[in-house]
Structures are given as structure tokens and as C-alpha cells.
Image: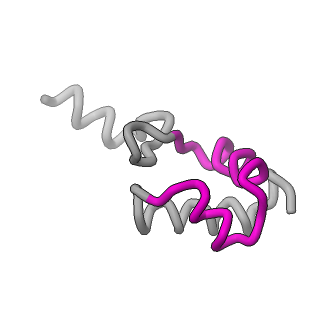
Amino acid sequence: MTATDDFHQEHVEQIIRGSRRIKQKDITLKLEASEERVGHIVIPVGFRKVCTRWVPRKLTSGINADRVKI
């Protein structure tokens, strides 16, 4: 398992989008991998943990356009 493995990155992204309050420890149990390895997978996926929720690191162009309108 590598951090650049597309299969694992997509799987982690689906898990996070399914439940934004999931803990990294729970992701490791679903993937059967170490917490360190999951940490390396989460970074390229583009999420970070903020106040117990996973949020995208960068705003998408659609979200950014909505913010400009507001």
C-alpha cells in the first residue's frame, strides 16, 4: 500500500465524504492499515481535520464562486 495508490486514495475519500466526523483511527480499521499510512493517504486526497470534521484543503472553483457572490 502506498500513498500514491489511486485505489486507496479513492477509498479514503469515499469514507471521509460518507462521514466527515470519522476519526483517522476508524479509517485505519476500515483499510486495515497503520495510522501513519492513512495520514500519508489523506494528504494527497486533499483533506485536513478541523474541529473533528474533515474539510477540503482548498476550495473548489464552484465554492469559491459562491463565496464571491455572497
Residue 1 in the image: state x and y as whole percent. Answer: 86, 63
Residue 27 in the image: state x and y as whole percent. Answer: 60, 63
Among all residues in the image, which is located at the extreme top?
68
Residue 50 in the image: state x and y as whole percent. Answer: 42, 37
Report if residue 44 lies within the magenta region: yes
Quadrant housing the C terminus:
top left
Colour pattern of the rendering:
one colour
Given residues 67 and 1, the one toward you in this image is 1
Report if residue 39 lies within the magenta region: yes
Number of on-image labels:
0
Task: Choose top left, top right, bottom left or bottom right for residue 33.
Answer: bottom right
Residue at screen point 63% across, 68% down: 11
Residue at screen point 22% across, 37% down: 66
- Look at the image and give the residue range highlighted in magenta: 22-48
Residue at screen point 50% across, 36% down: 57
Residue at screen point 44% across, 62% down: 17
Q: Is residue 57 above or below residue 39?
A: above
Q: Main secondary structure of the magenta part?
A: helix
Task: Choose top left, top right, bottom left or bottom right for residue 25.
Answer: bottom right
Q: Is residue 66 above or below residue 8?
A: above
Q: Is residue 7 above or below residue 59?
A: below
Among all residues in the image, which is located at the extreme left?
70
Q: Is residue 63 above or below residue 68?
A: below
Classify residue 47 as left or right of residue 66. Answer: right
Classify residue 37 as left or right of residue 12. Answer: right
